Image (cartoon, rainbow, N blue to C red):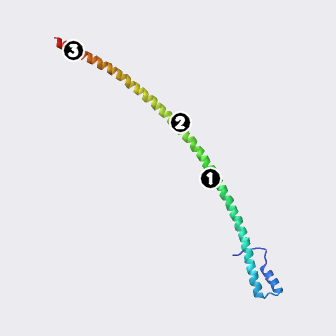
């Protein structure tokens, strides 16, 4: 992991050597400290990136929620329009059926009257034939 930071590992190793630390140990110590500081910087950058992603996810979620609500409202309006249209068509069909049923009832009344007349005429003819 290569990270740029303000830490100068060469300067640090030289200071350790001036303080009496053998050169190999000073170099290893400086390298380890440089890596540790790099990891801290990396962790901070990662945390900042994570925060940015969380914010972006919240914004996406908010946009999706708004779009979903808008689509739900649009669909509700369309459903109501279809419902009103269907109710009108159903009412029209109901009225037409009632009119047809009433027409059939009227025809049945005339047919009953006609059957009554036919039966009365047949009875009269039968009586006439029997009395002859």
* Disc 2 residue crowd, few under 14, some 14–19, many 20+, Cα 10 Å: few
Sequence-first tag of 3 and 2: 2
In the rendered view, tell whether residue 30 sits above or below residue 68: below
Q: Are marks 1 and 3 in contact (CB under 8 Å)?
A: no
Q: Which residue in the structure is indicated by mark 3? A: 125
Q: Are marks 1 and 2 in contact (CB under 8 Å)?
A: no
Q: Which residue in the structure is indicated by mark 1? A: 64
Q: Is residue 90 left or right of residue 53?
A: left
Residue occupying image coordinates x 52% and y 36% = 85
Give the distance between the C-alpha atoms of the residues marked 1 and 3, in whole angstroms. Answer: 88 Å
* Disc 3 residue crowd, few under 14, some 14–19, many 20+, Cα 10 Å: few
Q: Is residue 55 left or right of residue 9?
A: left
Residue occupying image coordinates x 20% and y 15% = 126
Sequence-first tag of 1 and 2: 1
Give the distance between the C-alpha atoms of the residues marked 1 and 2, in whole angstroms. Answer: 30 Å
Q: Which residue in the structure is indicated by mark 2? A: 84
Give the distance between the C-alpha atoms of the residues marked 3 and 2, in whole angstroms. Answer: 61 Å
For the N terminus, give its image quadrant: bottom right
Residue 55, percent from left and from top: 69, 59
* Disc 1 residue crowd, few under 14, some 14–19, many 20+, Cα 10 Å: few
Q: Quadrant of residue 8?
A: bottom right
Q: Quadrant of residue 57?
A: bottom right
Residue 79, percent from left and from top: 54, 41
Q: Is residue 18 left or right of residue 33?
A: right
Q: Is residue 69 left or right of residue 21?
A: left
Q: Are marks 3 and 2 in contact (CB under 8 Å)?
A: no
């Amino acid at each position: 992991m290569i990270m740029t930071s303000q830490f100068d590992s060469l300067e640090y190793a030289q200071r350790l050597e001036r303080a009496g630390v053998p050169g190999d140990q000073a170099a290893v110590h400086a390298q380890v400290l440089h890596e540790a500081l790099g990891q801290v910087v990396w962790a901070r950058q990662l945390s900042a990136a994570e925060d940015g992603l969380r914010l972006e996810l919240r914004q996406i979620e908010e946009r999706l929620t708004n779009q979903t609500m808008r689509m739900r409202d649009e669909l509700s309006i369309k459903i109501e329009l279809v419902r009103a249209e269907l109710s009108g068509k159903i009412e029209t069909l109901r009225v037409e059926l009632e009119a047809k049923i009433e027409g059939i009832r009227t025809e049945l009344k005339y047919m009953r009257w006609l059957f009554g007349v036919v039966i009365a005429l047949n009875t009269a003819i039968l009586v006439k034939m029997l009395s002859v």
